[in-house]
Amino acid sequence: MMTVTVEERALIEEIITKNKVCYVGMIGTDGLPYVLPMNFGYANDTIYLHSAQEGSSVRALEKNPNVCITFCTDPQLTYQNEEVACSYRMKCASVLCRGKVVFEEDFEEKVKVLNILMKQYTDRPFTYSTPAVNNVRIWKVEIEDISTKVFGVPHPNSRNYKDKLEF
């Protein structure tokens, strides 16, 4: 089994948009790693997140806005030889993004971001009340660095090898 690095933009975006949750890593106010599963939206190399106006994550990001956001497709157990334990592997694809959180305060921009977030989950249009928009904290993360890999790809010499990456 091999791990393949992916650089094709269309595949990277397919991996991101297939997900319903991302994992956001940051440094907590105590200096320790802090990771949260979060809903997200994605558009134009920017990941959008939302939270309450206050909380542990907001305090941590006000102190240090650097984040690492990870996406992973549903893993599936695969193997090259059913009798050989070391040939078993999880087949999946992951995207790891780094950037800095900027909190969006402009009302109209927040509405645009809320629409991007909802588009990740449904094509239905929404309207938002003024209190709802004012009470949400919008996080914008422009992707500064991205790394994408597909794990559990059969070796080219394997009878299970396919020319197309599947995840």
Image (cartoon, rainbow, N blue to C red):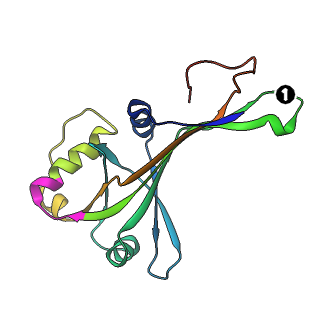
The picture quadrant where one finds residue 129 is bottom left
Residue 127, percent from left and from top: 14, 45
Residue 112 left/right relative to 117: left
Q: Which residues are magenta?
A: 103-110
Residue 167, percent from left and from top: 56, 30
Residue in view at x 35 percent, y 72 percent: 61
Q: Compared with residue 167, is residue 105 higher up or lower down, i.e. above or below?
A: below
User: Which quadrant would the N terminus be assigned to in this image?
Assistant: top right
Residue 25 left/right relative to 152: left
Instruction: Residue 136: tell me if it is visible.
Output: no
Residue in view at x 19 percent, y 59 percent: 132
The residue beneath circle 1 is 82
Crowdedness near tag 1: few (<14), some (14–19) or many (≥20) residues, C-alpha within 10 Å = few
Residue 24, percent from left and from top: 45, 59
Secondary structure of the residue carrying tag 1 is: loop
Q: Compared with residue 37, is residue 105 higher up or lower down, i.e. above or below?
A: below
Tag 1: amino acid: Glu
Q: Compared with residue 158, is residue 68 higher up or lower down, i.e. above or below?
A: below
Residue furthest to the bottom: 30
